[in-house]
Amino acid sequence: MNTEQARSPAELAEAQLTAYNAKDLDAFCACYAKDVQVWRMPDLQPRLTGLQAFRESYAAGAFANPALRAEVSERLVMGNKVVDYEWVHGRAPEPQPVMVVYHCAAGLIRAVYFFSPD
């Protein structure tokens, strides 16, 4: 990506959320770096590493569930980090809270950290 056209961390977080809710896998993956890592905290190892594994996981999981969508109730931005407090709809009868931290660099999301209340 041309650095002159690079999106800010807040723009990346919003673009990937929009693509996620639209089930647009290509637009979703375009927000992430080739070496993206996905963490489910408090795991000590990333759950996913690399864009291909990321794409395959989301294609078979979140993007295969037409009812699944996320709603951001609060977003904080500090430098190259974005923290979203989200409500995930479609996994359970009631919306589920999750906190997501996006670490951005060079106009892409490099790492994602998911925190659940339990």
Image (tube, helix red, strand yellow):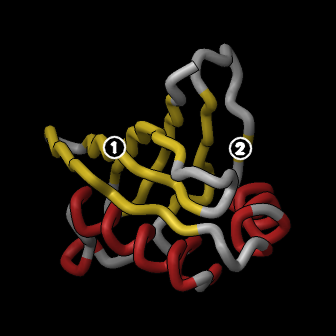
Which residue sits at x=39%, y=39%?
101
C-alpha span from label 1 to label 2:
23 Å
Height in image: 6 above or below 47?
below
Relative side of 46 to 81, left or right? right
Residue 92's x, y, as percent? Answer: 68, 51
* Residue type at tag 2: Thr
* Residue 56: quarter of image: bottom right
Q: Quadrant of the N terminus?
A: bottom left
* Residue type at tag 1: Tyr
Q: Secondary structure at mark 2?
A: strand
Relative side of 24 to 104, left or right? right
Q: Quadrant of the C terminus?
A: top right
* Residue 108: quarter of image: bottom left
Which residue sits at x=53%, y=29%?
116
Which residue sits at x=70%, y=51%?
50
Q: Which mark is residue 85?
A: 1
Q: Residues within 10 Å of mark 1 (few under 14, many from 20)?
A: some
Residue 64's x, y, as percent? Answer: 79, 74
Instruction: From the viewer's side, name the closer residue of 45 and 14.
Output: 14
Q: Residues within 10 Å of mark 2 (few under 14, many from 20)?
A: some
Q: Which mark is residue 49?
A: 2
Instruction: From the viewer's side, name the closer residue of 6 and 90.
Output: 90
Height in image: 30 above or below 13?
below
Residue 3's x, y, as percent? Answer: 26, 71
Q: Which mark is residue 64?
A: none
Height in image: 4 above or below 87?
below
Which residue occupies the extreme front position in the image? Answer: 93
Which residue sits at x=52%, y=52%?
95
* Residue 85: quarter of image: top left
